[in-house]
Amino acid sequence: MSLTVEQATEAVYESLDQNNLDIDFHIDNLKKALTDAGEKQAVFKPEKLAQNNRAGRKMMQSYFKKRGVKVIFED
């Protein structure tokens, strides 16, 4: 069963809240969901992140990019 982008994004938020538990698995699911939806990037809400500062957001973008997912943040 495929996840929607929203479900995959929520799973990433939960993983980040649980000290990155199974984060690579959730990133892979997010990548598949984005591909299935024809989307090119994942959108996250900064206020839902455990590390909501510039360094934390840049680290997240870098980590996800290495796994093939472009991350942007809502304003």
Image (cartoon, rainbow, N blue to C red):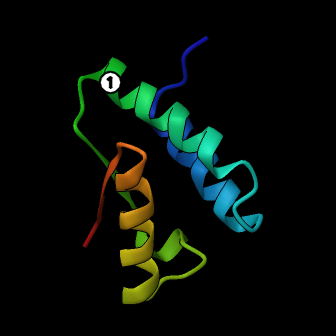
Q: Quadrant of the C terminus?
A: bottom left
Q: Look at mark 1 in the image and give the residue it sits on.
A: 35
Q: Give the residue at x 35% y 42%.
A: 68
Above or below — where is 10 with respect to 38? below
Tell me the SS state at disc 1.
helix
Above or below — where is 69 with respect to 5? below
Above or below — where is 32 with respect to 59? above
Q: 66 or 6, which lies in front?
A: 66
Answer with left or right where residue 67 lies relative to residue 23: left
**Residue 7, percent from left and from top:** 55, 36
Answer with left or right where residue 15 lies relative to residue 7: right
Amino acid type at image mark 1: Thr
Q: Give the residue at x 51% y 45%.
A: 9
The quadrant in which residue 59 appears is bottom left
**Residue 15, percent from left and from top:** 69, 55
Q: How many marks?
A: 1
Crowdedness of circle 1 by 10 Å Cα count: few (<14), some, many (20+)?
some
Q: Give the residue at x 52% y 43%.
A: 27
- In the current view of this chain or complex, which residue is farthest to the top? 1
**Residue 34, percent from left and from top:** 35, 31
Q: Quadrant of the N terminus?
A: top right
**Residue 64, percent from left and from top:** 42, 55
Q: 66 or 71, which lies in front?
A: 66
Q: Give the residue at x 43% y 27%.
A: 33
